Structures are given as structure tokens and as C-alpha cells.
Image (spheres, rainbow, N blue to C red):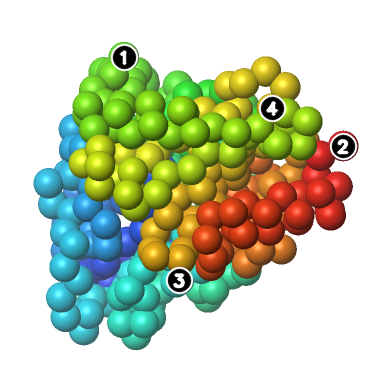
Amino acid sequence: MIDKIIEVIRQCQHFLITSHVRLDGDAIGSELALYLLLKRLGKECVVYNEDALPENYLFLPGSSQITQTLGDVSQYDAAFILDCSELERVGKEAERIKTIGVLINIDHHLSNDGFCEIRLIDPRASSTGELIWRLIEAMAIEPSPPIAECLYTAILTDTGSFRYGNTTFEALKTASQMVAYGASPQLISQEIYEKEPLEKMRLMARVLSGLSLEEQGKVACLVVTLKDLEETRASHNHTEGFVDLGRHIKGVAVSLFFSQVGPDTFKISMRSKDKIDVERVARMLGGGGHRNAAACKLQGDIESVKRRVLEVIKAYGVIA
């Protein structure tokens, strides 16, 4: 399928690049690496995201070119949908993007059902960034330092700084290649992890103060409400990484982060250790993801939503 993607790149001139709402490092790094690649090949391309870029990724090359306005989709010959297991994940413009003549999906989520005819999907890959690198390799192109910086960022963030189970040989090999091509691990880590805004730290303190443990201490629950965001002057972008806080606690096998996104709507991010499969839990609740990292969205007040998630965890024997 890589050959088909390369054929589209060679034949088309105007491209749209997009990814999911609630942007993370893999989505952003993959988008910008592909953007820089296409520009280098003399193509016209636009990176569109529904959400604004989180502050700690503004250092990435090309980030200033990302727009939150889609414009007329008839101008595009093809669209790349990155790090999305379904088209709806791009947000409110999904229906318009669907009308673009050629859709290409590059993704590594286990729950991806192949919504595009042209696709590069591998759940074994550490990140979408790793798959973008496969595409670049197949095109026999040596990445510039800016492309290497973006791809290293994608792999670094989606492996939890090389701590998660998806830190494979291929992930480490690709990351080391990006360093050889000019990416600076020290600079990238400092920009992403050591320049947090004060609003995020205040929100984190509030979230941690409300942390609760369930199922004999094996499940950690963290919650952020719209009121919390308002009172700390933070945004949903500032919650990136909060779901991992519960995993730091001794004895916790599953960390659940409940983020209120509407009056009666919560997004539930899930992280697990070892072989505990939270993708199965998310799938039963209408979501998906990876074995150790998944998410879903539920309607209801926080107590009913918590109860429903915990019931599924218990019913399917996710925790022994």
C-alpha cells in the first residue's frame, strides 16, 4: 500500500493534512513531518486541525503554518488523515473532508477498521510518526533535520519517553536514526516537558487533590471538570499527560482520566500496565485505541460515567 501512497503523492499537487481533535505529539509531529516532506517535493499543502496547537509544540518546524480554518475543500486533490482510527476523529469538518477525491489514512490504532481505501495501518508501530518514516524510506529520501525533529517528537511522546510497551526495537531504531539526521533529544525534551504553563500546573494540582483509588487500589481515577478549567484558566490542551499520573502510583494497574467536554459529556482516557487490555474496555464503550492506551466518550454525570466504566472493567475481567 506504500507504493500506492507514493503514486498519489507523485500524481497530485494539492494536499490537505489533518489529524484528530485534542492534538498530541504524535499527531502534530506526523503532520508536520509530512508537510515538510511534501513542500520539499514542490507540492502545495495545508495542515488543518480543529483544535489549536498546544503551546509546548510551537517550537516544531512548520507549526506556524497550521490553520484552524479548512476553507474550500475543492482545492485539494487528496487528503492525508493521520493518527485517526475513524474519519469522525478529525472533528466537525469530517463530512466536508470526506468529499475530497482521494483519502489516505496513516494510523497505528488497533481499533482502525480501514475507513480509507488507500491506507497504511500497523497497530504494531509505536506511532504514526514511525509509519511516516517508513513512507519516507520507501521514497528513498533523506530527511532534513526539521523532518527528523518532528518524527523524533512523534515517537518520543507516543512511547511515553520510551517507557511504554510500544517502545519496540523499531521505535528505538527509528528514533536513533532521527538523531543521526539532526534531531536533538535534549532540546526536544526540554521544549515538551520542561516549559509547562503555570495554568497547567495549577490544574494538575487540583486534579491530583481529587484523585481516588478503586478496586482495591488497582484503578486510579482522576477528573477534570469545566469548572476546574475555568477557575484555573486552563484549557483541554493543558490536560495532556494527566492520564499517566495514576500509573505512577504503586499498585495501580489502570489509570482513568475523566475529562468533561460538555455539560453531560466526558471523555475517558485509559492507560494500563503490562498485559492489561484497556482497548477492550474502550471498545465496549464505543471507543478504541491500543491495548495499553485507549479512550471513549460517554454521556452522563461524573458518578454515573465512573460507575459504568468500572462495571465494564470488572465485567470483562480486565483486572484480576
Q: CA distance from mark 3 to mark 2?
A: 35 Å
Q: Nearer the viewer, mark 3 or mark 2?
A: 2
Disc 2 marks which amino acid? Answer: Ala
Q: Earlier in the sequence, mark 4 or mark 1?
A: 1
Mark 3 or 4, closer to the camera: 4
Neighbor class of circle 4 (other Cα within 10 Å; few <14, some 14-19, many 20+) is: some
Residue sitting at 23 percent across and 59 percent down?
Answer: 47
Q: Amino acid at mark 3?
A: Leu
Q: Which residue is mark 2?
A: 320
Earlier sequence position, callout 3 versus callout 4: 3
- Residue carrying label 1: 186
Q: Is 299 situated left or right of 229 in this image?
A: right
Foreground mark, 4 or 1, reads 4
**Residue 134 makes an appearance in the image:** no
Q: Secondary structure at mark 4?
A: loop
Label drawn at residue 87: 3
Asked where in the image residue 193 lies, by quadrant, the reply is top left
Residue 188 coordinates in the image, percent (x, y): 29, 23
